[in-house]
Image: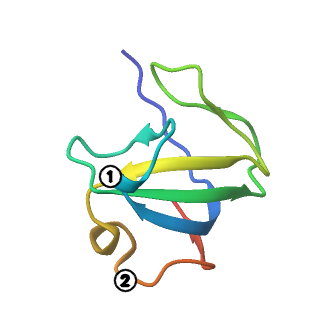
């Protein structure tokens, strides 16, 4: 199996506890506790998420499920900020 990776720039729109969210998410951690809504900014190309039908491209809002916001972003106040992930 070939694994590829890319860096995408995102702006964080909102964060929810996973129990308060209804909808589809991209699983980032096997033990998720939070859902992060992000809009993709200025991606150079489309990126297909492995083993799914999800395609990430510019201006798409995506939902990631993560275990810890602080472990991922090194801070807890992330709404409205831009990150390369």
Q: Position of residue 71 (x, y in %)?
A: 27, 70
Q: In the figure, residue 81 lies in which quadrant?
A: bottom right
Q: Residue at x 36, y 15 (%)?
A: 1
Q: Which residue is painted at 63% across and 79% down in the image? A: 80
Residue 18 drawn at (x, y percent): 35, 53
Q: Secondary structure at mark 2?
A: loop
| Secondary element at image label 1 | helix
Q: Is residue 81 above or below residue 66?
A: below
User: What residue is rendered at 34% in x and 69% in y?
Assistant: 69
**Number of marks present in the image shown:** 2
Give me the residue at 74% from left, 41% from top.
57
Q: Toward which corner of the image does residue 17 lie, by quadrant?
A: bottom left
Colour mapping used in the image: rainbow
Q: Could you say where residue 65 lies in the image, as x and y percent from the top left? A: 39, 49
Label 2 vs label 1: CA separation?
21 Å
Q: Earlier in the sequence, mark 2 or mark 1?
A: 1
Q: Residues within 10 Å of mark 2 (few under 14, many from 20)?
A: few
Residue 75: numbered disc: 2
- In the foreground, 43 or 4: 43
Out of 43 and 19, give the one closest to the viewer: 19
42 sits to left or right of 13: right
4 versus 76 height, above or below: above
10 Å crowding of disc 1: few (<14), some (14-19), many (20+): few
Q: Is residue 56 left or right of residue 37?
A: right
Mark toward the viewer: 2 or 1:
1
Residue 84 point in image, percent of width and height: 56, 65
Q: Which mark is residue 31?
A: none
Furthest-left residue in view? 31
Residue tagged 1: 19
11 relative to 57, above or below: below
């Amino acid at each position: 199996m070939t694994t590829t990776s890319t860096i995408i720039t995102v702006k964080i729109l909102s964060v929810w506890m996973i129990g308060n969210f209804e909808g589809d998410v991209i699983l980032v951690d096997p033990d998720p506790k939070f859902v992060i809504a992000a809009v993709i900014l200025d991606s150079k190309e489309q990126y297909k998420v492995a083993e799914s039908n999800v395609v990430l491209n510019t201006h798409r809002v995506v939902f990631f499920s993560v275990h810890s916001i602080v472990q991922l972003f090194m801070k807890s106040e992330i709404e409205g900020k831009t990150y390369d992930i």
